[in-house]
Amino acid sequence: MGGTMPPERLPLVAGNWKMNFDHLEATYFIQKLAWTLRDSHFDSHRCEISIMPSFTSLRSVQVLVEADHLPLSYGAQSVSVTTQGAFTGDVSADMLARLGCEYVIVGHSERRKYHPEDDANIVDQVRAVLAAGMHPILCVGESFEERRQGIALDFAVGQVTDVTRDLSDEQTSNILIAYEPVWAIGTGMVATPESAQEAAGAMRENIRSAFDDSVSAAVRILYGGSVTSRNAAQLIEQPDIDGFLVGGASLDVDEFASIARITEKFVRRLGRH
Ligand code: PEP
């Protein structure tokens, strides 16, 4: 499977704030996060940190990050599949790119559940994000039912195949995958490091057989689902896990910074980058 991580696979710790924090709270959080990381001599060349706030906070986050040259990236939690026009309430990929967004979460299980986001729509979102020069963080993962039926791995890997099937090598290299078992999201039940590695490894292998080796070596695969500072170390040690998509724990500055430090320390220990 993955083995050694090539230099371009910089680990990413991404915070999915979901529908939490207004723009004032977001500003305060980002400032405090930046101070906390600076005080602990965090090295952003060894681990990237990204925040996905609500649309309403993006401009404030942009201004802060740019004005203070903060070593953080940011992104959005969803995007419209269309570029402009009569789509009340939608936000286009170009609008997000203009705000300096690096990433857009696509296909989060909460979006799949509460909005009409089916596979075709998710493919279109991925294409829209790529066309605007950003990176989609494609969320996949089995539900408890698929796990009970013993088809978890096939299901999650199949979701990746369904989305990447018609993409080019270059497009696929620019995607990040977040393996997020639905039963682990917000439940406190985290996947074992072995099962998270099994899924991430199978996804990378699948990409390797569909595209070429350099594509599978470039794609960053994150784990998401009840990640905390207590379980992050064992997960990041897995060769095909390149970081985390963090929900609940990303709302607490100290906890989120701890997860980032654990990830950075692991990379430092291995002498990567
Ligand atoms: C998420 O929503 O992407 C997530 C992983 O949530 P949590 O960390 O709270 O399980």
Image (cartoon, rainbow, N blue to C red):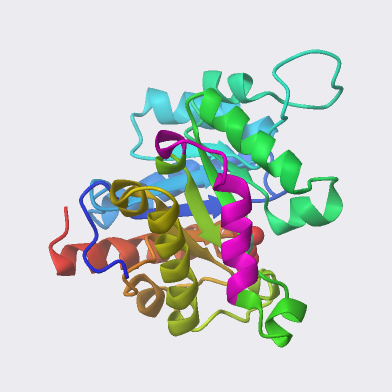
Residue located 53% across and 53% down the image: 15
Q: Nearer the viewer, residue 136 or 23?
A: 136
Left or right: residue 75 compared with residue 148: left
Q: Nearer the viewer, residue 138 or 268?
A: 138
Q: Residue 265 in the image: x percent, y percent?
A: 24, 66
Residue located 60% across and 19% down the image: 94
**Could you tell me if residue 218 is visible in this image?**
yes
Q: Which residues, given as a range, are shown in magenta?
A: 153-171
Left or right: residue 45 compared with residue 127: left
Residue 137 drawn above or below residue 251: above
Name of the residue lying farthest toward the top? 85
Left or right: residue 125 compared with residue 10: right
Q: How many marks?
A: 0
Left or right: residue 224 compared with residue 83: left
**Could you tell me if residue 54 is visible in this image?**
no
Q: Nearer the viewer, residue 103 or 56?
A: 103
Q: Residue 184 in the image: x percent, y percent?
A: 64, 74
Query: Does the magenta-highlighted stretch encompass residue 39?
Result: no
Query: Does the magenta-highlighted stretch encompass residue 165?
Result: yes
Q: Quadrant of ligand 1?
A: bottom right
The N terminus - image quarter: bottom left
Q: Residue 107 in the image: x percent, y percent?
A: 68, 49
Q: Residue 3 in the image: x percent, y percent?
A: 24, 69
The answer to which quarter of the image holds residue 151 is: bottom right
Magenta-colored segment: predominant secondary structure: helix
